[in-house]
Image: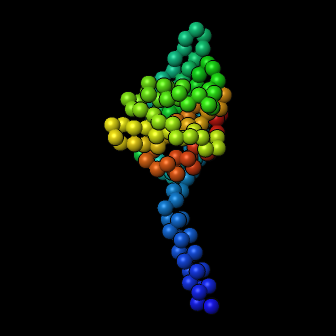
Amino acid sequence: MDKKWILLCMMFLVSLVIGSVGAAELESHDFGDYFSMDVPKGTDFSNETIISAENGTTQVVAVFMGGDLEIVYLNSTKDFDKNATDHFKVIFEAIYPMNLNHKGPEGDLIIFEADDDGDTYPVVVKTSGNELVYVIGDDLNLIKEMGNTIKFD
């Protein structure tokens, strides 16, 4: 009986070690004056920003690229409706030449999958009022973890 419990404890400890090896270590990163988010430690991001001013209003589209990640920030003159998944698809497909398929909500996040001629990439969306962030990467669990840490400035 004691050997059974020892074996179960060892299996549990091994599963904890294996699980922690795969987890990325994250650190907080500020994306200009727009938002902050936890990202994999040591990731450097390049930035492309487009600022448009029409009819006295300013709109920003900022794309941040680093490693296997792309992060897109948008602000709008109108608030984003969290249930307007078709609207999110139209915006995304205007920026990227790929199809965006809705997978569903998960807490404060909206999960999509981008299809680029058979290559698929998970996409996480988070909104707050008139601000929107797309997080695109290879690892759905990682980008969901990142998306849950988004704080709009």
Viewer-side residue, 133 vs 106:
106
Instruction: Residue 108: give x, y in percent of width and height.
Output: 64, 40
Q: Is residue 30 above or below residue 1?
A: above
Instruction: Residue 25: give x, y in percent of width and height.
Output: 54, 56
Q: Extreme top residue here?
A: 55
The coloring applied to the image is rainbow
Viewer-side residue, 124 vs 68:
124
Quarter of the image for residue 128 reads top right
Viewer-side residue, 46 vs 77:
77
Residue ID at (63%, 31%): 82
Q: Is residue 62 visible?
A: no
Residue ID at (61%, 44%): 106
Residue ID at (61%, 18%): 77
Q: Extreme left residue here?
A: 117
Instruction: Residue 109: give x, y in percent of width and height.
Output: 60, 40
Numbered circles on residues, count: 0
Where's the N terminus, which quadrant?
bottom right
Q: Is residue 103 visible?
A: yes
Instruction: Residue 124: give x, y in percent of width and height.
Output: 53, 40
Where's the C terminus, which quadrant?
top right
Residue ID at (53%, 71%): 15
